[in-house]
Image: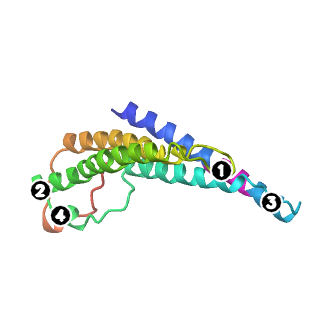
Amino acid sequence: MPKIRRFLDICLGTTCSFLLLSMVVILSWQVISRYVFNDPSTYTEELLRLGLVWLSLLGAAYSAGRGSHMAIDLLRDISRGRFQKLLKMLVPISFIIFSIYVLILGGLHSMQIASKQLTAVLQMPMSSFYAALPVCGVLLILYAILNLIDVLKEPMNTKTGSDIDQPLSMGE
């Protein structure tokens, strides 16, 4: 399982880095063409919008896979034993349910609706924007399954009260 997680991390990290670098270059060109040449580029805004959608969703999958997503973990940190393990399992299970129904099924439906629409300048299908939803959903499910396996493999923590030194995280 660590090899699968490492492969996903490398692929997503590289893709997000490439997207960010591309967006910086495109944005720089937009500023230069507008203020230096006094002839604003027409296609840069659409490319930046597409890049932002993909970067945001792929970055969300990456952060969820690394366990660095936003969470309120006070209850999980003060609980012990089986209850703590159940609370730790709740996040990946929630990600799986959300990914299936909202990102994958909703994203495919949105792609179908937008498939006949084209962007104004580049004449790209609008479904290329919505395709990020099911792709992100599949990645989130893969990461959630890996995180769920990690939680199931870890031993139960039976420390109580003042024995708590540091909160536990998904990676421990």
Label 4: which residue? 163
In the displayed structure, would residue 131 be above or below residue 48?
above
Relative to residue 156, is residue 59 drawn left or right? right
SS under mark 1? helix
Query: Residue placed at 80% from the left, 60% from the top?
Result: 40
In the displayed image of the protein, which residue is found farthest to the front?
A: 116
Residue type beneath disc 3? Pro
Instruction: Give the residue displayed 55% in from the left and 47% down from the top.
Output: 117
Tag 2 near tag 1, CB within 8 Å = no
Please provide the residue range marked out in magenta. Answer: 20-27
Which label sits in the foreground, 2 or 1? 1
Instruction: Please give the residue where the numbered disc 2 appears in the rendered image.
Output: 83
Lower position in the chain sequence, tag 2 or tag 1: 1
> Which mark sits nearer the N-terminus, 1 or 3?
3
Q: Which residue corresponds to mark 1?
A: 47
Q: Which mark is residue 40?
A: 3
Closest to the observer: 129 or 7?
Answer: 129
- Badge 2 marks a residue whose secondary structure is helix
Residue at x 71%, y 53% (from the top left corner):
44
Label 2 and label 4: CA atoms lie apart by: 17 Å
User: How many neighbours does mark 2 have within 10 angstroms: few (below 14), some (14-19), or many (20 or more)?
Assistant: few
Q: Are marks 1 and 4 in contact (CB under 8 Å)?
A: no
Residue type highlighted by circle 2: Phe
Q: Position of residue 25 (x, y in %)?
A: 73, 51
